[in-house]
Image (spheres, helix red, strand yellow):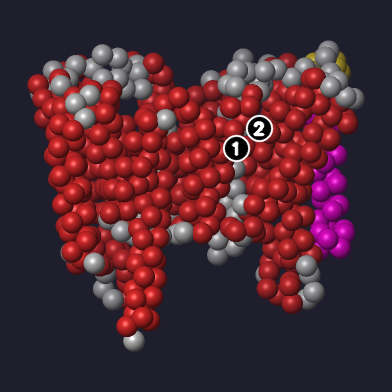
Amino acid sequence: MSGLACAGAAIAILILLSWPLIFNNKFYITIGTMVVLSAIGATSLNLIIRTGHVSLAHAAFMGVAAYTCVLLQMRLGVPFWLAMVAGCLASGLLALILGPIVLRLTGKYFVLVTFLVGEIIRMIFVEWQSLTGGANGIQNIPPGLDIMKTPTGFYYLALGAAVVCVGIAWRILSSEIGRAMDSVREAEKLAECSGIPVIKLKITIFVISCTLVGVYGILQTYLLQFIDPSAFNMEASLNLVVMNVLGGMYYLLGPVLGSTFLAALPELLRGYVDLQRVIFGVILIVVMAALPGGIIGLMEALRRLIQKLTAGKTS
Amino acid sequence: MFTLPILSQVVVNGLSLSAIYVLVALGFTLLFGIMRVVNFAHGAFAMLGGYALFYAYGSFKLPYALAVFGSAFTVACFGLIFEYLVYRWFYQKMFQSMIGLMGLNMAIVFSSVMIWDVNERTIPAAASGILSVWGLTIPMDRLVIMGITIVVLSLFWFFVTKTRHGLAMRAASQDVDIAAAQGINTTFIYRLAFFVAIFMTALAGGLYAQTYALSPFIGERPLMVAFIVVILGGMGSIPGAALGGVLLGMGESFLSTFYGAAVSSFVSFGVVVALLIFRPWGLLGKPE
């Protein structure tokens, strides 16, 4: 089985690396870029989900980073790299300020408060017209780097960023911190009694996650060369949640798989935008009602079933 | 600026807004209190209520009272299909219900976009003209909204406190297993509560769409309102929903008249966030 997994991973890496070469077409390369970028967003949200919280303010943090970066570059002429770092730090800083307040709540209250905080941040984007351009947003954002001028270049830039971000998430989840996060999710009181600093851990993860999602927000904005508040509304946050739910919330591979489906499908089904939303909705209901483990959970269950069947034959 | 005619206008607008908000929030709090379901599809049912009223009153020209109650009744019956297909699986599962019902919301809203397109429609007003008493002017359509709401709320109050099924519903909201052990048919009670909740939501949606405009996306605002009101009053608390609805409706009417719509949204959201942090169980709820 692990041989099969290795082969799968090798094929996936090969496809990811050679994607622009296989499909030498601007449209498909851009879809690839979007998939890779949304994997960053979904993975960063996965970190928060692993501590037992579902945040609906994640897209708002994306927006904070993206607006900071765009405004620094366009108004003050700050070089892109510096502006990008500043943008990510801005969303991280906001998370550090809000985290200790909102993370006192758990479960449904956390979902509700992040939903409202996200809406408040989005309303600030709309209302602060002198700075953000209001509901019209800011058009014609110049490419930040030379590599961003070609679709292929942008794809490899996004892939690099995704590898770094997913790598960070993987490193966290497979370390001692990751196991502490699992224990906080499963039994918070027990974890606290075992000496895990629960609140401190949650805030740290929240800040890291919101910093990482800044990368997604900034790169997506530069890909579209356009920024407006509607890209950072509740629906965008919800999309990230859907990616996690569909792929499998409690596996790192889950959000990556989920984002492949959910970022590629809308682009390929451009003519049927409404129908595809309906299908997403139905998928969400079915997955939540019947398959809490998502795609990965389904595969895991199938694997166990096959193992059981083959074990039955040999014995 | 704070003159009597303006203030009286603010109060009348506030009361008619409060009426709609209380109706929306009561349905939401009922579903939460009894089935432990966070109904993210609440706005979608309000929107369907708007379309039902659009056809019943705008197209078929039924008498107004019949159109209003008939359309809400139709949507509630239609909602029972969703109860059977979707909601049943999420009872007593708070977390799964949130995400699953966001999916239902998306499915209903975008199906409506496919059926009715995104253009805004208007429902003709129930009554035109104004009523003048003691120098105050009150638009008739606002009075109609308040009247309908008062009727429905009194019926609801009578149903919950004075009837057998209302008693069974209150028992089920306290402890489902014990209620079932006393011989209460909880499946039926759940269905009944669901029906009542969707009826009130669809009614509120119709009145809301009549006051503003109708499109597949009008459900967003009632959903947001239901959240705010229910958090203000306390999740699952019926008097809390009434208090929260009046507070939000009056506050919004006052702030948006004197300081603009943006200020009013910021203040109501800010107050709710603060309340959630310091008193998550709301004004009239009980801590868990």
Quadrant, the C terminus of chain A: bottom left
Q: Residue furthest bottom?
A: A315
Residue B258 on image: x %, y %: 58, 20
- Pick whichever, A243 or B141, lies toward us: A243
All told, the count of numbered labels is 2
User: Where is residue A209 shown, x and y percent of the image?
Assistant: 26, 47
Span shown in magenta? B144-167
Q: Position of residue A278 (x, y in %)?
A: 53, 37
- Do labels 1 and 2 touch, CB within 8 Å? yes
Residue at which label 1 appears: B108
| Res. B47 mark | 2
Counting residues from the start of the chain, the first of labels 1 and 2 encountered is: 2
Is there any visible trace of residue B24 in the rendered image? yes
Magenta portion: prevailing SS class = helix
Q: Is residue B17 left or right of residue A103?
A: right
Q: Is residue A29 above or below residue B227?
A: above
Label 1 CA crowd tier, 10 Å (few <14, some 14–19, many 20+): many
Quarter holding the N terminus of chain A is bottom left
